[in-house]
Amino acid sequence: MNRRLLLALLLALPTPLAAQFGALDSIVAEGVRRGVYPGAAVVVGTSTAIVHTRGFGHFTWDPRSPAPDPATTAWDLASLTKVVATTAAAALLVDQGRLALDTPVRRYLPRFAGGAKDQVTVRMLLDHTSGLPAWVDFARLTRDRDGALALLYATPLRRPPGTRAEYSDLNAILLGLVVERVAARPLERITEDSIFAPLGMRNTRYLPPDSWRARVAPTGVWHGHPIAGEVNDQNSKRLGGVSGHAGLFASAADVARYAQWWLRRGSPLVRPATIDTFLSSDPAAGARLLGWESRTTDEYTPSPYGTLPTLRAYGHTGWTGTMLWIDPERDLFVVFLTNRAFGPKVAKPFTALHEIRAKVADAAVRATPGACRAEIRPVC
């Protein structure tokens, strides 16, 4: 065998790195085959580079439907809205000195007042220690946005503020309203003009226009037809599709740009000190940071962030099947977006999704050059 042919054969062999990302791809593809979700998109990267990106499956269970494109397919982010939109807008206003974390919410929203509510601060909305219940069915109990807001302000606290964390959509809804009051602009305008546009997130927005519909991954079916471009969260829909807890649509590539912004500690939009503040926690909040979950948040078993991200890692998930986690110690992020809300075909689909998320997170750590350095714990 001549040397040229031998070299060609060697170059054609899969590298260890390709094999590792092949393992990650197999995990995601298996979720499609098992019927956990019809489609998915993954982006893995560092603060300066994208190291892996791929789409899987199709928009629906019909193999003739489009295949997801990480660059252009828009996904209903569900609760990732809390960190990609609302937390970011709050951080921007805090950095500008216009929003104070330890100021009572009633100073910004006078209707949220009375009794122990007077003690609830903006920080408590972010770390979920306000004492508000996890959820209220505004869509069933009210007819329009005004009715939903009236019920929101009237909802009593379940425990004294600042005592312990309970994850609550109501906190994020109120925080979105605070942001709007401070900035004197609608939440969709604040986020698009001040965050998404500067970061190059051109495929991220609330209320996707009709021109986007063909590239939005559906999350439901109505009379036999896939629903795309309408927020899956019914409370967000009752609030007009723009709210602090849900309603944002984005491509995987755009969420990756957002993750890189946090790995760069806010450059160029906010100061590193502001990012550090949002990545700190109060003892009452346990493992919760400001807006974010830390890796040790034990609300899910298994953890959707796997076993290999370090204790400095933080992230968030969404009901439609979305996940973002960021590990500054490993200089690594993983974006994993699915539309598992579109007619899953397995029993206990949420449990299956948690298992897949955890495996994806660990596979990403193992596959990325430099992420498994010996001095970083846990080791791979």
Image (tube, rainbow, N blue to C red):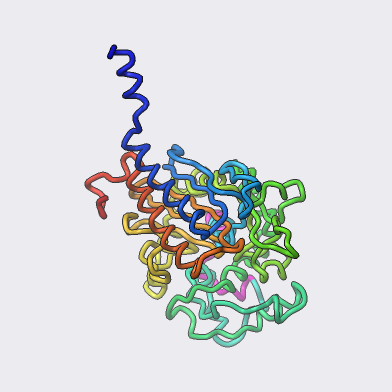
**Along the viewing direction, whichever of 259 and 306 lies nearer the viewer:** 306
User: Along the horizontal axis of the image, is 113 left or right of 7?
Assistant: right
Question: What residue is shown at x 59% (from left), y 74% (from top)?
Answer: 170
Quadrant location of residue 172? bottom right
Check the image and name the residue furthest to the left. 374
Q: Is residue 89 visible?
A: no
Question: What residue is shown at x 57% (from left), y 81% (from top)?
Answer: 118
Question: What residue is shown at x 28% (from left), y 45% (from top)?
Answer: 372
Residue range of the region highlighted in magenta in the rendering: 92-108
Image quadrant occupied by the N terminus: top left
Q: Is residue 100 visible?
A: yes
Quadrant location of residue 298? bottom left
- Magenta stretch encompasses residue 106: yes
Residue 377 placement (x, y as % from top left) = 25, 53
Residue 224 placement (x, y as % from top left) = 73, 62
Residue 302 placement (x, y as % from top left) = 38, 66
Q: Is residue 32 above or below residue 123?
A: above
